[in-house]
Image: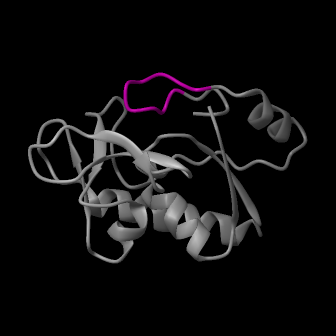
């Protein structure tokens, strides 16, 4: 989405100057973990339930959408796909979309319990948590 590709949950993009500059230099790999995990675009808005992306990786939290569906496995599959591509291309850093349940680095939407409205809280998305755990340097924008 940071390169102007319409892959956000609502079918929009979040084009960002820094991402576009990196792409022009040939050093950016466009990845949407949510699409890689098998989610369509557009798709229902999703958030983390019971913890952040690190907790999802440890099995202590999950990802749910506004329809009440659990989509944790698709988020995990997408995170693993993003990591696989990062390794194939020898990536050392990732530029990620802020506040995303996949890509947020500093803050993400989390509901503490079932039926609770999600709120922006400190934490990471699922893909960000996996990339960080595997040693990539992360930066969020947008």
Residue 8 x %, y %: 45, 32
Q: Is the residue 43 above or below the residue 101 in the image? A: above
**82 sits to left or right of 72:** right
Which residue is depicted at the point 42% across and 68% down?
A: 54
Residue 127 x %, y %: 49, 59
Q: Magenta segment: does it hold 12?
A: yes
Q: Magenta segment: does it hold 102?
A: no
What is the quadrant of residue 3 in the picture? top right
- Direction right: furthest residue: 25
Residue 112 x %, y %: 22, 53
Q: Is the residue 122 above or below the residue 8 in the image? A: below
Which residue is depicted at the point 31% across and 61% down?
A: 51
Residue 134 x %, y %: 61, 76
| Observer-nearest of 90 and 134 | 134
Of the 4 image quadrants, the one containing the C terminus is top right
Which residue is depicted at the point 84% across and 50% down?
A: 27
Q: Is the residue 2 above or below the residue 125 in the image? A: above
**91 sits to left or right of 53:** right
Question: Total of numbered circles in the picture?
Answer: 0
Q: Is the residue 22 above or below the residue 87 in the image? A: above
What is the quadrant of residue 93 in the picture? bottom right
Which residue is depicted at the point 48% across and 68% down?
A: 80
Model colouring = one colour
**67 sits to left or right of 47:** left
Determine the main secondary structure of the stretch shown in magenta.
loop
What are the residue bounds of the magenta stretch? 6-14
| Observer-nearest of 84 and 55 | 55
Of the 4 image quadrants, the one containing the N terminus is top right
What is the quadrant of residue 77 in the picture? bottom left
């Amino acid at each position: 989405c940071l390169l102007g590709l319409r892959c956000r949950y609502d079918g929009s993009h979040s084009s960002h100057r820094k991402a576009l500059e990196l792409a022009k230099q040939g050093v950016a790999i466009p990845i949407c973990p949510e699409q890689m995990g098998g989610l369509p675009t557009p798709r229902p808005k999703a958030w983390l339930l019971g913890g952040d992306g690190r907790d999802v990786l440890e099995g202590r939290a999950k990802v749910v959408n506004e329809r009440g569906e659990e989509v944790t496995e698709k988020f995990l599959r997408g995170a693993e796909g993003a990591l696989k591509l990062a390794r194939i291309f020898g990536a050392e850093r990732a530029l990620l979309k802020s506040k995303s349940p996949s890509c947020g680095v500093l803050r993400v939407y989390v509901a503490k319990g079932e039926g609770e409205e999600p709120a922006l809280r400190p934490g990471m998305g699922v893909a960000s948590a996996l990339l960080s755990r595997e040693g990539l340097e992360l930066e969020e924008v947008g």
